[in-house]
Amino acid sequence: MASQDKAGMDGMEAIESTQSRGSDLKVASPKTVRYSDFLLRLLALALTLVAVIVLAVAKETKTVHVTVAPNLPPLNIPATAKWQNMSALVYFMVTNAIACAYATLSLVTNRGGKCGMALTLIVLDLVMVALLFSGNGAAGAVGVLGLRGNSHARWNKVCNNFGVYCLRILASIGLSLLGSLVFFLLVVLSVWNLHKKSP
Amino acid sequence: MASQDKAGMDGMEAIESTQSRGSDLKVASPKTVRYSDFLLRLLALALTLVAVIVLAVAKETKTVHVTVAPNLPPLNIPATAKWQNMSALVYFMVTNAIACAYATLSLVTNRGGKCGMALTLIVLDLVMVALLFSGNGAAGAVGVLGLRGNSHARWNKVCNNFGVYCLRILASIGLSLLGSLVFFLLVVLSVWNLHKKSP
């Protein structure tokens, strides 16, 4: 394996130089990497922010027909569906808010492109992947229950009464899922670059 | 930044040599890295396998008192709680089975320590992190619903009747959570090593 003497070269210049690794991989210029990283973080910020906003406005009030007994007429009770009523949706909201705040902070702190920050950012991006995917899983699980119900547990479906509420939650989950995929890509991008830079 | 001429050195020996990076980071020997990686994969395999087994045996049959109407005596109906009845638990089972199968495969394929496999394995480890955390989130969400119920959606708690079933699901979620943390550590370990190896 041939290697180059990089004595006296600046760290960022060294990245730009092609390193012979047998597989002829070319290292992307730091500018391209930083630009992609910036765009992805901006996208993650936008997606998680919109997911939070869409969930926050997911509120619907309707008159629900409740059957108390088979021989009695159903009662009409006004009911409000909101995300605060379901612990899984509260957790989903918290994970997206944390990811959104982190995306904003990382955009600010990563602009200098300091080498020491790189590892911390990769690990924190990874934490966001785990956090967002667990939130998506939790929200998805109650979303399916709201849509279909569960006859075994005798949990009735909710979405037949609260269609708009369910649609907004679905949209929020979709946005959050895209956001988590962006964080996933950020980790892959960082690993890809470290892999190319390694001897 | 001082640098060493590593021409003629073998790739793995080059990793062993200390690279002056200003911060005096010492690169772990490839043996140590491979040993840690092997142990972590073995641990991930064991944890996800036991999580799958514990969930598979989570089945309980009990006589449930169902109140049809307030003026009628409650009916005694035999009911069986099993993971197949809840789509979130089916998803949880599938994610753990995939992670378990992948951990086994990666143990076999990673023994040669081929450089070309490294990036693929990191990305696949990352996929496992995302997959397992979403499964944990889904199972956790229905677990909380089973334990507490939800008065707003009129979903009654299940765990007051099926205590053993709920305990086993809780144990399975705990094991899977540990398994996903091991996959998380595997990604961090790989990133840490790539970071140290990079110039």
Image: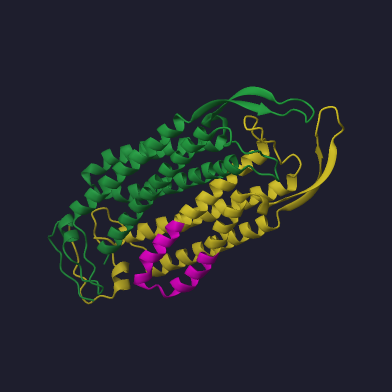
Chain colours: A yellow, B green
Secondary structure predominantly adopted by residues drawn in magenta: helix
On the rendered image, what quadrant is the N terminus of chain A found in? bottom left
On the rendered image, what quadrant is the C terminus of chain A found in? bottom left
Residue A96 belongs to the span the image colors magenta: no
Nearest the eye: A47 or B188 = B188
Residue B45: give x, y in percent of width and height: 34, 39
The reply, left or right, for residue B40 in relation to residue B136 is: left
- Residue drawn at (62%, 57%), measured in percent from left and top? A51
Residue B82: give x, y in percent of width and height: 53, 29
- Residue drawn at (70%, 43%), measured in percent from left and top? B153
The reply, left or right, for residue B61 in relation to residue B73 is: left
From the viewer's perspective, is residue A172 above or below residue B174?
below
- Residue drawn at (68%, 28%), measured in percent from left and top? B66
Residue B125: give x, y in percent of width and height: 37, 47
Nearest the eye: A196 or B79 = B79
Asked if residue B104 can be seen in this view, the reply is yes
From the viewer's perspective, is residue B132 above or below residue A107?
above
What's drawn in magenta, residue-wise?
A: A101-127
From the viewer's perspective, is residue B10 above or below residue A13?
above
The reply, left or right, for residue A66 in relation to residue B126 is: right
Residue B105: give x, y in percent of width and height: 32, 37
Nearest the eye: B119 or A26 = B119
Residue A123 belongs to the span the image colors magenta: yes
Q: Quadrant of residue A66 in the image?
A: top right
Number of numbered discs on residues = 0
